[in-house]
Image (tube, rainbow, N blue to C red):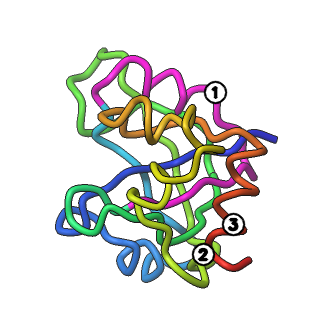
Amino acid sequence: MAHWLYKSEPEVWSWEQQVEAGAKGTYWNGVRNHSAKLNLMAMKKGEQGFFYHSNEGKEIVGIVEVIREAYPDHTAEQGSPWVMVDLKAVKPLKRPVTLAEVKADKRLAKMSLVTSMRLSVQPVTDEEWAIILDLAGH
């Protein structure tokens, strides 16, 4: 199974709001980048990802799960190619992992979070997933 990273500015949509959405989860909309769109389209129900607070905080704070695969984004113009998925919060990380920590760890030098900073939805390799969980104390 693939892993992912979802970036959100906490003042727009925070980890706390994702948790409050409960088991029914919520849609992950507003993606307007073709690479990120392709990532959304590749996601399968049950796959997990990291929830990352961008701009403010700049840290991985939790784990989310895909509960509905890609479907048309209702916030986009009708007929546009943009899609969204539904996510639910799984659990917070025991300890947030900061962007500075990720950049400082040579094992994560090729992670999309380091190499594709502006991409809002990113793939995470199995090795990167394990390293982040280790850094977070899991």
Identify residue type, mark 2. Ala
Q: Which quadrant of the figure has residue 15?
A: bottom left
Within 10 angstroms of label 1, few (less than 14), some, or many (20 or more) residues? few
Q: Earlier in the sequence, mark 1 or mark 3?
A: 1
Question: Which span of residues is magenta-colored?
Answer: 32-52
Near-viewer residue (134 or 80): 134
Find the distance from the CA under tag 1 to the CA under tag 2. Answer: 22 Å
- Residue 86 in view (yes/no): yes
Crowdedness near tag 2: few (<14), some (14–19) or many (≥20) residues, C-alpha within 10 Å = few
Q: Which residue position is annotated with label 1?
A: 42
Residue 67 seen in the current view: no
The residue to which callout 2 is attached is: 23
Above or below: residue 110 compared with residue 52: above
CA gap between label 2 and label 3 equals 22 Å
Which residue appears at 72% of the width and 49% of the height? 47
Instruction: Identify the disc placed on residue 133.
Output: 3
Q: Closer to the N terminus: mark 1 or mark 2?
A: 2
Please tell me which of labels 2 and 3 falls first in the chain. Answer: 2
Secondary structure under badge 1? Answer: helix
Image point 48% across, 53% down: which residue? 104
Tag 2 secondary structure: helix
